[in-house]
Image: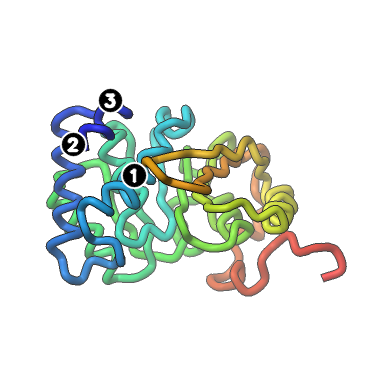
Amino acid sequence: METLGDRYGLTERQLDQLSAILGELEDAEWAPTAVRDAGQAMDVHLADSLVALELESVRSATRIADLGSGAGFPGLALAVGLPGTEVTLVESQARKCAFIERTSAAAAIENARAVCARAEEWREGLGRNDVIVARALAAQPVVLEYAAPLLRLGGTLVDWRGRRDRAQEAQAARAADELGLSLLEVRHTEPYLGARDHHLHVFEKVAETPPRFPRRPGVARKRPLGPPRGK
């Protein structure tokens, strides 16, 4: 834990909050993740989430939304790391929302809240977020479609990815053009010792997203944007 504290300049209180998150993962038998051991979760969940603090757009954000938050990552870790930022964790499954709320309370994370809804149905968030984060959520063109309507103009999407897939990146580029997004960078990261093929794909919202988005729930996955020509 001290390594994370040194790397990101975290206070003792923030380190205690992160430890409380690990405690909930270990203690709650119904924690919605296969990684519950504190030692492993410190790397796989906490360090992998906090690596986004290396991005200026994340550090300076006033409002962040975590789409498909699952067990609460990266949203809860970023809320701890950025106590002055409002972090909304958007998760469609009630069981996972309950775990996020329980963990947030146990760790006394006052700037995080769970919204139990699909990303396409979260109307309150349309055009209001400085940063959207998504980790292991869906194919990249789908993530772009979920995120674009929720970003303010000039806002950024940070999409966690593993090994690079050039074909999917090409499809994502075509989807981005349609959604008013532009790729800023693909940053290789090493959130913890031994981590391989970790990348943050960072997109900026450079134009207003067409009003036909978001499409109905489920459509983005069934008919993703940006397919190769002729398909």
Task: List the residue tagged with mark 2.
Answer: 15
Q: CA distance from mark 3 to mark 1?
A: 20 Å
Task: List the residue tagged with mark 3.
Answer: 9
Could you say which quadrant of the image residue 83 lies in?
top left
Could you say which quadrant of the image residue 95 lies in?
bottom left
What type is the residue that disc 1 sits on?
Val
Q: Secondary structure at mark 2?
A: helix
28 is higher (above) or lower (below) than 3: below
At 40% from the left and 40% from the top, the residue drawn is 191
Q: Secondary structure at mark 3?
A: loop
Task: List the residue tagged with mark 1.
Answer: 87
Question: In the rendered view, how is the structure colored?
Answer: rainbow
x and y, in percent, of residue 91 in the image? 37, 62
What type is the residue that disc 3 sits on?
Gly
> How many numbered badges does the structure rendering display?
3
State the residue in front, 115 or 29: 29
Label 3 crowding class (10 Å Cα cut-off): few <14, some 14-19, many 20+?
few
Q: CA distance from mark 3 to mark 2?
A: 10 Å
Q: CA distance from mark 1 to mark 2?
A: 18 Å
